[in-house]
Amino acid sequence: MQQEVIIVGGGMVGLSLALMLAKANIAVKLLEAIKYPNYDDINLAPYHSSFDARNSALSRRSVQIYQELGLWDALQQHATPILQVHITEQGSFGKARLLAEQEKVESFGQVIENAWLGRVLLTQVRQQALIELIDGVQVTSLTQDAEHAYITASRGEEQLQLQAKLVIAADGRDSFCRQALGVGVSEHDYDQVAIVTTVQTSKSHQHVGFERFSPLGPLALLPLPGEYRRSVVWPVKKGTEQEWLGDENDQHFLDALQQTYGDRAGKFQKTGKRFSYPLSQVLAEKQAVGRVVLMGNAAHTIHPVAGQGFNLCMRDAYVLLRYLEAQQAAGADIGEPNMLLEYEQARLKDQQRVIKFCDSVVRGFSNQNPMLKLLRNTGLIAFDLIPGIKPLVATYAMGLKA
């Protein structure tokens, strides 16, 4: 008997997981609150890189997962590899470098435009006979008994009553499903807002990513498709973000980047529109309850400093897929609550490691204590000199330790 899964939330994690399940011959109903654009529409403009686009850094592991799904050739059209990572602190002598060649890997990951990733995933999902896509739908209740999970949803005037052996809640940081299950969260507000944009520089990026720790916050500059375009992620203190947003502040923003980076990237010539979003860490107290499993930001939202959030979600999705495939092969119930608890246990170590790593990087570098500064500098130097440290850090960052 064909067992069906309901996924609530059709963001990048929900779409990716739906494709993984369909490839494993598991039927999916995918519910998404927004109405998707119709990319089959002949009147829709072809894809152009927007200067205002948001980007994601995909770890090597995430790239491997998309390769397995047969999607990487399409995704690569608007992605660029990171071949080196330089970590420095403004006004300090420490410096750390990671080179893909030295670590014997083809890259540390790829930076991709979110709009392109979403478009490729959505186009694929629409072509899958095993995936029923229901968009523009609001989930209004989630309940369960020993046999099934039940969802009520509204779509315009229409009321939908759905049931499945398993519900996967990938409905974001403020997850309705998580609240409906009565699952609490532990939340830490970093008192920071991330400024995200694209800039153009006079020097070609040469596939180098920079992480620079400055008095204004840790600033990431990643290579983008197009030799001179780079993605900026810059966490600043909450309440100061207005200083950097809006067209009238373009030059002020470029000047601040110039001052922070010096000549490393050449001249900062142009900036796209800046977006801002508050940074907090939100961790669900449980990720599996009965026949419902939390996925993506509904399970854990973390600081973007090391670009690990989406990649962690992809590893979660991949491991869950393995559990569901095993159940299916045995002719067993794919929503079996004990199996979902086993999945949750299996993921805790990787999740906690990444969460702790991101958290300690943020706290460690945002502290201006001179003694800590000395430790950081000597730490960065040791990083470059002590054999064994670099491959270890590189492996973690590439998400292969899952």
Image (cartoon, grey):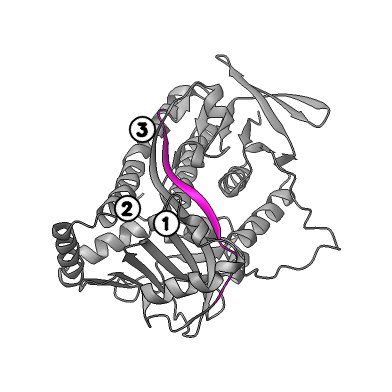
Q: Residues within 10 Å of mark 1 (few under 14, many from 20)?
A: many
Question: Is the stretch drawn in magenta largely helix, strand or loop?
Answer: strand
Work out whether 297 lies above or below 45.
above
276 drawn magenta: yes
Work out whether 208 lies above or below 395.
below
- The amino acid type of the residue labelled 3 equals Gln
- Pointer 1 with pointer 2, Cβ within 8 A: yes
Quote the CA–CA distance across marks 1 and 3: 32 Å
Judged from the image, the secondary structure of the residue bearing numbered disc 1 is strand
Looking at the image, can residue 267 be seen? yes
Q: Give the labeled residue for mark 1.
A: 235
Judged from the image, the secondary structure of the residue bearing numbered disc 3 is helix
Could you tell me residue 269's position as x and y percent?
53, 80
Looking at the image, can residue 295 be seen? no
The residue depicted at 68 percent of the width and 58 percent of the height is 119
Of marks 1 and 2, which one's residue comes earlier in the chain?
1
Q: Residues within 10 Å of mark 3 (few under 14, many from 20)?
A: few
Q: Give the labeled residue for mark 3.
A: 345
Q: Magenta segment, which residues?
A: 270-285
380 drawn magenta: no
Report the front residue among 343 and 277: 277
Of marks 3 and 2, which one's residue comes earlier in the chain?
3
- The amino acid type of the residue labelled 2 equals Val
Report the front residue among 33 and 63: 33
Is residue 158 found left or right of 211 in the rendered image? right
Report the front residue among 328 and 349: 349
Q: Give the labeled residue for mark 2.
A: 362
